[in-house]
């Protein structure tokens, strides 16, 4: 078998860890890539490091890039409050960080090309997210086109594949898969607030807890971690 | 007149400064954005700061992002030599930095959306560059499509325009325009080596000097600065 390498963007949450593990199960070497971008919930980076170790990734790299200098999101500007009233349909919440996923994938492409990796694993999921423009299938399709044109390897016909296995999964399916893959869910961090315990009220906590309740694993809900 | 804002990616070289000045002449407010990415020729950042001041830009921001941790280019890995034998046709030289322009534009999109800017000015030029995949028209077109889908403003129909006015210009035309716009060419920095004086032998010095000789301005060539 020819060994291939995947760069897995790792947030410290369950989605990206699941995508990384699916790649490993398929025989890929996985290098985790995390971002210290001035996020309020910097705590997720410790979760990402713990997961990388626990899941036995090939390597784990954290890149610093300060997006808080211009804010534009409640995740990078602490003067804006994180919404706690529940998910609003058909609106993009203020937790949307301008350009964030585009930057992360671009940095992933750089690392992938430099290290000879042929895939970038993304935990993005369009089904039950909060309407972020950069978690949708048309966005991913356009980025694949750009990735093919942006790189030496792409121009040579060996483009780096943007691979988002969870894109159209229900959140419950993601958790079931994570449990099957023996991902230590209690080590993941989803809360936007970044306090010592998850708030249980932000969109991210709500989405996580709802899915865990639906599959009968309340024991892993935010308030119990 | 409604005032608009342009984010101008500023390398410290002549192309990006020219693009910024064309935007200013058209009545745009211009915010310069430069990148400390672990480049060998870090010296270009001082040139960018000097130019931003000299050209009276609205603001100038430098963002740090260390691409040297994975190298993949002679610009970010000092164990690789910068080519000095002259420009080779139909090859991508080792000064190509994987993912660099894709990352820079992505960060520009983040800043533009956060600050309400409607354009990103790029000094990229496809004519006499060294075959970089990420300086070509098809790349730019694909990135515009992605930009429209990636952002809140794009989804709302007010996408940020990627604007590369020099894309198909001859280098001589760029220098003539720069002189007309009274850009202090002697303050720009193009050399890849980053020594105290330009080397005059790298592709970037060669392209610059050839064009300046062609328009009869040898006095501004690398070896005289």
Image (cartoon, coloured by chain):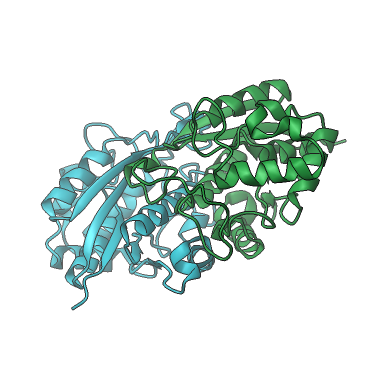
Chain colours: A green, B cyan
Identify the residue shown where x is 47% and y is 48%: B103
Identify the residue shown where x is 73% and y is 25%: A55
Specify whether residue A153 is in view: yes
Q: Position of residue A58 (x, y in %)?
A: 70, 25
Q: Position of residue A194 (x, y in %)?
A: 49, 32
Q: Position of residue A42 (x, y in %)?
A: 48, 31
- Say which quarter of the image contains residue B2: bottom left
A29 left or right of B26?
right
- Say which quarter of the image contains residue A190: top right
Q: Nearer the viewer, residue B194 or A204?
A: A204
Q: Position of residue A105 (x, y in %)?
A: 56, 47
Examine the rendered structure and indicate whether residue B180 appears above or below residue B105. below
A87 left or right of A25?
left
Examine the rendered structure and indicate whether residue A164 appears above or below residue A92. above
Extreme-right residue of the structure: A1
Image quarter (top left, top right, bottom left or bottom right) of the C terminus of chain A: top right
A78 left or right of A10?
left
Identify the residue shown where x is 49% and y is 56%: A93
Q: Nearer the viewer, residue A71 or A225?
A: A225
Specify whether residue A27 is in view: no
Identify the residue shown where x is 21% and y is 71%: B3
Image quarter (top left, top right, bottom left or bottom right) of the N terminus of chain A: top right
Q: How many marks?
A: 0
- Say which quarter of the image contains residue A33: top right
Examine the rendered structure and indicate whether residue B104 appears above or below residue B21. above
């Amino acid at each position: 078998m020819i060994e291939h390498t995947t760069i897995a963007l790792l947030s410290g949450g369950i989605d990206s860890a699941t995508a990384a593990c699916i790649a490993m199960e398929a025989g890929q070497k996985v290098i985790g890539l995390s971002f210290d971008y001035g996020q309020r919930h910097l705590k997720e980076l410790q979760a990402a490091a713990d997961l990388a170790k626990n899941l036995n990734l090939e390597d784990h790299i954290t890149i610093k890039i300060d997006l808080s200098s211009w804010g534009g999101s409640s995740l990078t500007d602490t003067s804006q409050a994180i919404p706690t009233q529940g998910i609003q349909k058909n609106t993009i919440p203020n937790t949307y960080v301008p350009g964030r996923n585009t930057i992360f994938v671009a940095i992933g492409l750089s690392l992938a090309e430099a290290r000879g990796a042929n895939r970038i694993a993304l935990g993005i999921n369009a089904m039950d997210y909060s309407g972020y423009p950069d978690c949708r299938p048309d966005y991913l399709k356009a980025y694949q086109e750009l990735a093919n044109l942006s790189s030496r390897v792409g121009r040579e016909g060996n483009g780096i594949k943007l691979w988002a296995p969870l894109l159209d999964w229900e959140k419950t399916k993601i958790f079931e898969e994570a449990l099957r893959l023996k991902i230590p869910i209690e080590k993941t961090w989803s809360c936007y607030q970044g306090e010592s315990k998850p708030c249980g009220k932000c969109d991210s906590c709500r989405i996580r807890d709802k899915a865990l309740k639906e599959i009968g694993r309340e024991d892993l809900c935010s308030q119990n971690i």
